Image (cartoon, rainbow, N blue to C red):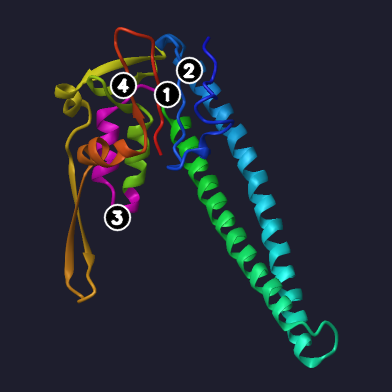
């Protein structure tokens, strides 16, 4: 079994400026289940490291705030003649402390973003390929038809990405076949036979108080919008290559 390619991610995937997690594994398709398990373990490891970074960033920020407060007090006392008396020096110390707070705050925000990104990606990858029952077109259609709001459609979305994942070489999708625990290649021209282009219409109230029509097409959502979350690339002549984009 191939091992996780850590060289590209420099210990964890979030050193990438675009905060993109990339996992590459040369595995036969029949071992895809093990592949998913290893990826989840790797994500958990990354998440643990990010949490430590988050805690460290919080401590640095707290220390910077404390330092700024002390510098501010010292700067104030310098005018009262109760201690230091060097206005210029105290102002520099205070100004430096303010800069440290700004930098610490930036690190705080970045760590929170990366932690949230990890959670989202780990959730996405844990769904695909874990379904015990075969995909049901009727069940999926029912989840869409019975939805009473846009938030209700989340069930239909989750059901869909539990069985399908896009890939671009060549264009099409992988479909998880739970009965044989394997993947099936579905070319572009046949996707609509499984993921029906059902359009659901909702009416919401606009700011002017008038009803506003909102349309949602599950096929369009999966093929266009969802493709930016989870993308697989496969060369049929080679072993499976799996890639997750944030």
Q: Secondary structure at mark 4?
A: strand
Disc 3 and disc 2: Cα gap in Å?
A: 34 Å
Q: Which percent across, then down, holds residue 97?
A: 67, 68
**Do the residues bearing badges 2 and 1 touch, measured as CB atoms within 8 Å?**
yes
Where does the magenta region start and end?
A: 132-152
Q: Which percent across, then down, holds residue 143?
A: 30, 41
**Do the residues bearing badges 3 and 4 touch, measured as CB atoms within 8 Å?**
no
Q: Which mark is residue 33?
A: 2
First in sequence: mark 1 vs mark 4 = 1
Is 142 covered by the magenta stretch? yes
**Do the residues bearing badges 3 and 1 touch, measured as CB atoms within 8 Å?**
no
Is 231 covered by the magenta stretch? no
First in sequence: mark 4 vs mark 2 = 2
First in sequence: mark 2 vs mark 1 = 2
First in sequence: mark 3 vs mark 2 = 2
Disc 3 and disc 1: Cα gap in Å?
A: 28 Å
Question: Which residue is under mark 4?
Answer: 174
Q: Secondary structure at mark 1?
A: loop
Question: Which residue is under mark 1?
Answer: 129
Disc 4 and disc 2: Cα gap in Å?
A: 14 Å
Mark 3, mark 1: which one is toward the viewer?
1
Residue drawn at (55%, 24%) of the image: 6
First in sequence: mark 3 vs mark 1 = 1
Q: Residue 124, located in which quarter of the rendered image?
A: top left
Mark 1, mark 4: which one is toward the viewer?
4
Q: Is residue 22 left or right of residue 173?
A: right
Q: Which mark is residue 149?
A: 3
Q: Foreground residue, 29 or 127? A: 29
Q: Is residue 8 left or right of residue 44?
A: left
Q: Secondary structure at mark 2?
A: helix
First in sequence: mark 3 vs mark 4 = 3
């Amino acid at each position: 079994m191939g091992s996780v390619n850590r060289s590209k991610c420099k210990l964890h995937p979030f050193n990438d400026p675009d905060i993109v997690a990339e996992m590459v594994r040369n595995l036969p398709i029949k071992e895809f289940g093990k592949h998913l398990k290893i990826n989840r373990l790797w994500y958990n490891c990354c998440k643990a490291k990010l949490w430590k970074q988050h805690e460290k960033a919080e401590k640095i920020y707290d220390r910077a705030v404390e330092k700024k407060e002390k510098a501010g007090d010292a700067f104030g006392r310098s005018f009262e003649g109760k201690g230091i008396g060097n206005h210029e020096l105290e102002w520099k110390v205070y100004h430096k402390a303010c800069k440290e707070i700004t930098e610490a705050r930036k690190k705080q925000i970045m760590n929170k973003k990366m932690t949230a990104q990890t959670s989202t990606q780990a959730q996405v990858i844990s769904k695909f390929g874990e379904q015990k029952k075969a995909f049901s077109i009727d069940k999926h259609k029912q989840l869409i038809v019975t939805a009473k709001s846009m938030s209700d459609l989340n069930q239909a979305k989750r059901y869909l990405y539990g069985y399908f994942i896009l890939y671009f070489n060549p264009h099409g999708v992988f479909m998880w076949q739970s009965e044989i625990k394997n993947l099936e290649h579905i070319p572009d021209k046949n996707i609509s036979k499984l993921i029906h282009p059902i359009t659901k219409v909702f009416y919401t109230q606009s700011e002017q108080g008038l009803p506003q029509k909102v349309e949602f097409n599950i096929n369009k959502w999966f093929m266009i919008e969802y493709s930016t979350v989870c993308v697989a690339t496969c060369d049929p002549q080679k072993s499976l290559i799996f890639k997750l984009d944030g």
